Amino acid sequence: MFDALKTKNEIVEFIRDYYRKNNLKGAVLGISGGKDSGVVAGLMAEAIGPENLVGLTLPCHSKQIDADGAKLVADRFGFELINIDLTNTFDAFHLEIEKMGEYSTEELKNSDINLKPRLRMASVYYMAALLSATRGGTYIVPGTSNACELYVGYFTKGGDSVYDIAPIYSLTVEEVIKVGEVLDVPKEVLYRAPDDGLSGLTDEDKLGVKYSEIASVIRQDKEIEKETFEKIERLHKNSLHKFIIPKFELK
C-alpha cells in the first residue's frame, strides 16, 4: 500500500540531503499550472524554504488556465513567481525558419511542439545562473517528470528532460496525486486533466493509453488488455533512444 505521507517526507529529506551535501541555496522551477510542477513546487518549498524557490511561468501561445494554475500554486506555497513570455521568441525563431522556404502547419507541428519545452529549458537555466550570480548561492533546476511519462518517453529530449534533481522520478501519476493531496496542492491544479499545454490534446489523447494502464505495467499490480500492454511496451522500447546516447569508444 502506497503511503503518501511517508513518501512525501522521504522526498523532502532526499532534497534537503542533496542540498546539504552540495552546498546549494535555491531552485528555479518552471510552473505549468499542472499537477507535476505543482507537487514538485510543494516538495521544494518544504525542503528548502519558499524564500529559496523561484517559479517561472513561461507562456508561449499558451492558455490563461496555465497562468492561473501557476499563481494558485505560488500563492499556496508562498514562493516568488516570475513571468517570462516566450511568445515573441518563438515567433522570431519561426521567422528565421520561413526564410528557408514554405512549410505546412502539419510539417511544422512536431518541431513546434518540441521547440517550446526547449525554449523553456533554456529560460529556467538562464534564470538559475542569474540568481546564482546575484543571490549569494547556487540555484539548480528541479525536474517534473513522473514515472509514467518517463516509461513511455513522453518528454522532449533537450527540453523537459533536462534538470538537476528529480523529486517525482519514481512516482506514478496516481502516486503524484496522492502526494499532492498530502501537500495540499490546489485542487484545480492537482485534478486537472494532464496536457502538455502545447498541442491542445490531453496527455492520454496523445499517447492513446491511460496513465493508470502505464502504472499497471510499471508496478505489475493489475492485468490490462494484451493490446494495451503491447502498445505501452512499444512506446517504451521506441523511446529508449532518449535515454541512451551511443558513444564511439577509441580502442
Image (spheres, rainbow, N blue to C red):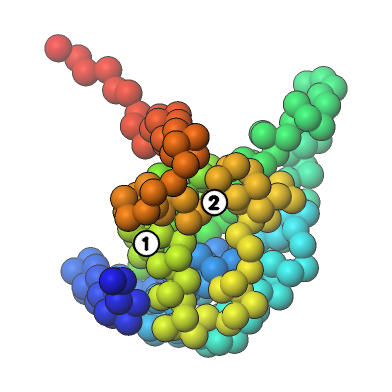
- In the image, what residue occupies the spot 27% across and 17% down? 248
- In the image, what residue occupies the spot 79% across and 44% down? 91
Q: Earlier in the sequence, mark 1 or mark 2?
A: 1
Q: Give the class, few, some or many, for how many residues have Cα within 10 Å of label 1's Cα (few <14, many ≥20).
A: some
Checking the image for residue 226, the label placed there is none
Quarter of the rendering containing residue 71: bottom right
Relative to 124, 10 lies left or right: left
Relative to 170, 204 lies left or right: right
Residue 47 higher or lower than 116, as above or below: below
For residue 16, say whether it is visible: no
Front residue (pair 185, 245)? 185
Looking at the rendered structure, the kind of residue marked 1 is Leu
Checking the image for residue 171, the label placed there is 1
The quadrant of the picture occupied by the C terminus is top left
Residue 173 % position (x, y): 46, 61
Q: Give the class, few, some or many, for how many residues have Cα within 10 Å of label 2's Cα (few <14, many ≥20).
A: some
Front residue (pair 181, 114)? 181
Q: Which residue is mark 2?
A: 210
Looking at the rendered structure, the kind of residue marked 2 is Lys
The quadrant of the picture occupied by the N terminus is bottom left
**Could you tell me how far apart the alpha carbons at marks 1 and 2 are, in whole angstroms?**
15 Å
Residue 207 higher or lower than 145, as above or below: above
- In the image, what residue occupies the spot 39% across and 49% down? 223
Describe the element under mark 1 as helix, strand or loop. loop
Relative to 148, 100 lies left or right: right
Front residue (pair 147, 45)? 147
For residue 78, say whether it is visible: yes
Residue 76 higher or lower than 86, as above or below: below
Describe the element under mark 2 as helix, strand or loop. loop
